[in-house]
């Protein structure tokens, strides 16, 4: 049977859902776009909290943006482009939500200078605790901030995120195909360059598809 789904439309509604006496079957499992390759919310019993209604852009600054966690990455990127800004850190699958990309495993950083996980760009976040309280996590408590990155909703439900952003910079893309040995031979050179690198490894065919930015 399908699990019951709650879809809060405000942080206040989210807090009410998690407070004791809400009447929802436990455990409560937050969900973003549901775009994972595995059914992360499939389980026996409990309630799914669909976060996609919390999708507002709250503030855009020169070097940061504050959004609600249900905002899709593509919408955020489009909004930032209007300000001449772009997301920093490795990210992909633009249909995902910001909260899902922060709290779940986002595709890792590319090879090169300055490329890091998307979740490493989090400056602060607001979380509803399992008891329905409000918690702000920021750099004043760095270990706690690190714990909430890639926490999969196990420590609380992230509903607001502030991310670093940077001025938009144009780039060109070149695509190449090579063998595993050929990639290994030039890896050190690529690491020392200013190229952005994405690659798709097909080990059983001994082929690597490169995308150089």
Image: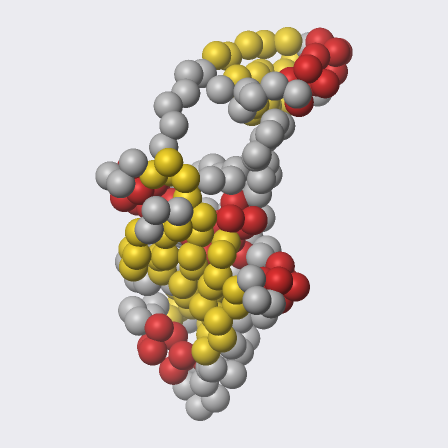
> How was the colour assigned to the protein in this rendering?
secondary structure
Residue in the foreground of this view, choosing between 69 and 190: 190
- The x and y percentages for residue 90 are 52, 38
Residue in the picture at 29% in, 69% down: 9
Q: Is residue 100 above or below residue 20?
A: above
Furthest toward the left, the residue is 82
Residue 165 visible within the image: yes
Please give left or right for residue 186 compared with residue 139 in the image.
right
Q: Residue 195 falls in which quadrant of the image?
A: top right
Residue in the foreground of this view, choosing between 16 and 185: 185
Residue in the picture at 36% in, 57% down: 66
Q: Is residue 23 above or below residue 176?
A: below
Q: Residue 24 falls in which quadrant of the image?
A: bottom left
Q: Is residue 192 above or below residue 7?
A: above
Residue in the picture at 45% in, 16% down: 173
- The x and y percentages for residue 48 are 45, 67
Residue 30 visible within the image: no
Residue in the foreground of this view, choosing between 55 and 27: 55
Please give left or right for residue 24 compared with residue 192 in the image.
left
Q: What number of labels is visible?
A: 0
Residue in the picture at 36% in, 32% down: 168
Residue in the foreground of this view, choosing between 183 and 170: 170
Please give left or right for residue 197 compared with residue 98 in the image.
right
Furthest toward the bottom, the residue is 21
- The x and y percentages for residue 141 are 60, 67
């Amino acid at each position: 049977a399908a699990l019951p789904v709650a879809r809060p439309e405000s942080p206040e509604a989210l807090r009410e859902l998690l407070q004791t006496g809400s009447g929802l079957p436990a455990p409560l499992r937050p969900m973003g776009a549901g775009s994972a390759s595995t059914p992360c919310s499939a389980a026996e019993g409990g309630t799914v909290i669909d976060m996609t209604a919390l999708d507002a852009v709250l503030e855009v600054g020169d070097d940061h943006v504050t959004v609600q966690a249900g905002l899709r990455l593509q919408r955020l990127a489009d909004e930032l482009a209007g300000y001449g800004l772009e997301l920093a850190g490795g990210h992909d699958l633009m249909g995902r939500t910001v909260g899902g990309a922060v709290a779940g495993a986002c595709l890792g950083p590319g090879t090169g200078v300055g490329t890091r996980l998307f979740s490493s760009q989090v400056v602060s976040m607001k979380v509803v605790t399992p008891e329905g309280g409000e918690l702000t996590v920021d750099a004043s408590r760095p270990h706690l901030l690190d714990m909430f990155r890639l926490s999969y909703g196990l420590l609380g439900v992230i509903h607001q995120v502030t991310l670093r952003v940077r001025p938009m910079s144009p780039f060109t893309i070149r695509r190449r195909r090579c063998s595993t040995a050929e990639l290994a031979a030039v890896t050190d050179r690529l690491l020392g360059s200013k190229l952005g690198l994405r690659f798709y490894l097909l080990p059983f065919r001994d082929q690597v598809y490169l995308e150089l930015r």
